[in-house]
Amino acid sequence: MPVRLSVTSTRYGPVLAALASAALFGIAHRVSVVLVVAFLLGVVNAVLVGRSGSIWPAVLAHATNNMIALVLAYLLG
């Protein structure tokens, strides 16, 4: 688990750490339209990191999400 999530998880528990991380992930995107989706993806990413012990599954999920959004934006105009 990455150090920041690990320290937060140890101090506040894994659920609160994942929710806090997801909230920061959502806020970092700064677009209110995608805030909820970014928050949910942040929760998924936190779970992926927690279960795998590696950041790479979360990076892959993030890249896949961005690719899907880009293709949909292109196709739908």
Image (cartoon, helix red, strand yellow):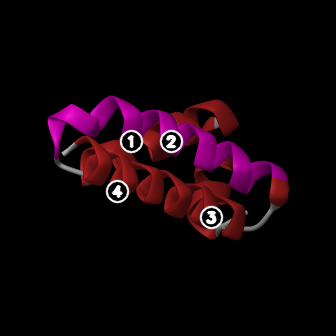
Q: Please tell me which residue lies in front, 38 or 50.
A: 38
Label annotation for residue 70: 4
Q: Disc 3 versus disc 1: distance between alpha carbons?
A: 15 Å
Task: Give the residue pinned by disc 3.
Answer: 60
Is 23 on the left-hand or right-hand side of 34? right
Q: Secondary structure at mark 4?
A: helix
Q: Amino acid at mark 3?
A: Leu
Which quadrant holds residue 39? top left
Is there CB contact under 8 Å for labels 3 and 1? no
Q: Amino acid at mark 1?
A: Ala
Q: Nearer the viewer, mark 3 or mark 1?
A: 3
Neighbor class of circle 4 (other Cα within 10 Å; few <14, some 14-19, many 20+) is few
Query: What is the spatial separation of the Cα atoms under label 3 and label 2, in whole angstroms?
Result: 12 Å
Mark in the foreground, 2 or 4 = 4
Disc 3 and disc 2 in contact, CB within 8 angstroms:
no
Q: Answer with left or right where residue 30 lies relative to residue 15.
A: left
Q: Tell me if mark 3 has few (under 14), some (14-19) or many (20+) residues whose alpha carbon lies within 10 angstroms of its own.
A: few
Question: Who comes first in sequence, dot 3 or dot 1?
Answer: 1
Part of the protein shown in magenta = 31-51
Secondary structure type for disc 3: helix
Front one among 43 and 6: 43
Task: Judge left or right: residue 18 versus residue 37.
Answer: right
Task: Decide which of tag 3 and tag 4 comes sooner along the chain.
Answer: 3
Q: Nearer the viewer, mark 1 or mark 4?
A: 4
| Of marks 3 and 4, the one in the foreground | 4
Q: Residue 30 colored magenta? A: no
